[in-house]
Image: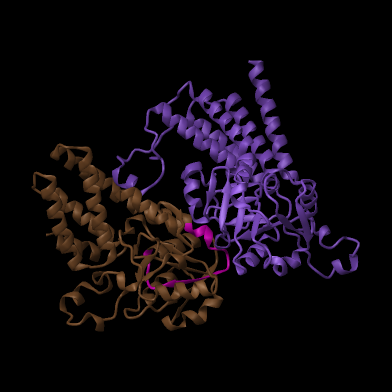
Chain colours: A brown, B purple
Amino acid sequence: GDNTTFRAQLRDDPDVASAVAAIRALLGFLKQDRGETIQGLRSSLLAAIDTLSRVDSSVAVSSGGELFLRFISLTSLEYSDYSKCKEIMIERGEIFLRKVSLSRNKIAKLCHPFIRDGARILTHAYSRVVLRVLEAAVESKKRFSVYVTESQPDQAGQKMAKALRKLNIPVTVILDAAVGYIMEKVDLVLVGAEGVVESGGIINKIGTNQIAVCAKAQNKPFYVVAESFKFVRLFPLNQQDVPDKFKYKADTLKTSQNLTEEHPWIDYTSPSLITLLFTDLGVLTPSAVSDELIKLYL
Amino acid sequence: MPGAADRGSELSEQIEAFVARLRGGGERPRSEDTARQTLSLLRKIIAHGRWSRAGELMDLIRTEGQRMTAAQPSETTVGNMVRRVLKVIREEYGRLHGRSEESDQQESLHKLLTSGGLSEDFSTPYPPLRANVIEAINELLIELEGTTDNIAMQALEHIHSNEVIMTIGYSRTVEAFLKEAARKRKFQVIVAECAPFCQGHEMAVRLSKENIETTVMSDAAIFAVMSRVNKVIIGTKTILANGALIAVSGTHTLALAAKHHSTPLIVCAPMFKLSPQFPNEEDSFHKFVSPQEVLPFTEGEILAKINVHCPVFDYVPPELITLFISNIGGNAPSYIYRLMSELYHPDDYEL
């Protein structure tokens, strides 16, 4: 049912964030649900989220799912009549989806003033939000050049470079190993995030932590752009604390014999290495992120 | 009505005079005076201006505010006061409109999930709004009066006997802070003279009048002396949204020397200096004055061959600062974002 809808959404609209696709699938599931109680709804939603994470076990789907569950709980607290509650939920769900579709533009508007004319930017792998920010900077007539890491093992950096060339931005693809070498030439580092954790740190494609450490060592600002639905209720203290289900692809988790021999796809960057986070809730320092999460979940 | 027209033109005259004074520069105005003048002017605009709804009033304030801030971008207190007034208007409107006192005006994940999609309109006219807003501004003015005293009152907690305190330039807030502590404790102060204007000299004279043992030294000696200093206490022109400072030129050097020796750096600044701007956005913070102070015009031959700059301000990143002491208490730089959300509304960050 929603498995196929979810997969279809991800395929048809490559521009949509996987968390948004997950929330859309869950909303569709909610509309079709025949249950009569909130408890029943919650348990079927939990099962649905589980199914979705078996398709795509990334952080984004997990955060989208948790946010949706929270949304259900908050709404059900206000209305005790189930059918009225369900109507309100569906209405608010649509409004929420509409708002988040605007979030990338909001972020681009906040972030592009930080890119000065003549800047040299370093970015990592393929991020749609970073692409939107750079697009906004081009629209405001700024000239800058970009270095992209190749980002093995899937060479996502090449995809990013192709998209940037279409915008007429001078782009250089560099080896992942060349980050330390290139850092002295760079003015700022701009990356996206798959998830933003409670401490204000981020979970992103493997290699991000390295770039952050190099940037810190050479005093270059390290900016993160992420939508607010990526905020996740995790508090990892080191790389080990990040759950395995995020580190490896869903298929690998199912089939692999020994996970320690697999290469992880993501890493954790601690908040002390991040200068500022640009989200649709505004420009935040890493210490402000936990405040936002507390406001939501408490 | 001739009365209204007269008042209207008198008001625009006053605004023009204020803008011209800001643009003129001249001698360094005191931030508190600028804030007070801005608030009084805004109060007059609200009292005499032609508006009937909150939305119109906010647009009016915003237009005037843009004009005033454009006259002198480095005087951030003007913009800060305009934003405070806009927040006050929003609050008073909300109170009359019957909404709850919660900060549900702020963007948050929570609001994203639970809102019904309506955005605030500000179009319902409320007759008592004018009086309420003016009263709130009067409260703001009273708060302004007390800021230096509130900061000075915290002095005894931070300064202990036989300590060596270092400061730079001349800050009236720090002067009041140190004077208050000197009433009960005995300590020494080293003042960096802060070339080329050498305002440190005036600071030293004022402190020594209160029988505080003061030493003046040149900026070049800051690092050399730092090992003997217990605390560094400075004032600032502006506090930025990420907890950084725009302070008098030479402060970054002082902050780096303090960091190297692990000496705490305390910034005494009232809350009206907190600005919701971030650094990196168009270098409009830099103010340059005549290089006459650095290299006088009498050195004509050399002047033709070189470039001389005389910047007034310095940027100090938040990692170098230990504590902010303001009229509402002591805070860490990482907490500034929270104070900002209490003072200003996110929609007003861009005037």
Count of marks overlaid on the render: 0
Is-magenta flag for residue A177?
A: no
User: What is the x, y in percent for residue B127?
Assistant: 48, 21
Residue positioned 67% across, 68% down in the render: B227
Magenta part of the chain: A111-128
In which quadrant will I find the N terminus of chain A?
bottom left
Vertical position of residue B348 compared to residue A46: above or below = above
Residue positioned 53% across, 68% down in the render: A144
Residue positioned 40% across, 40% down in the render: B103
Vertical position of residue B103 compared to residue A176: above or below = above
User: What is the x, y in percent for residue B184?
Assistant: 67, 46
**Residue B344 in view, yes or no:** no
Is-magenta flag for residue A121?
A: yes
Vertical position of residue B170 compared to residue B296: above or below = above
Identify the image quadrant of residue B321. Answer: bottom right
**Residue A220 in view, yes or no:** yes
Identify the image quadrant of residue A194. Answer: bottom left
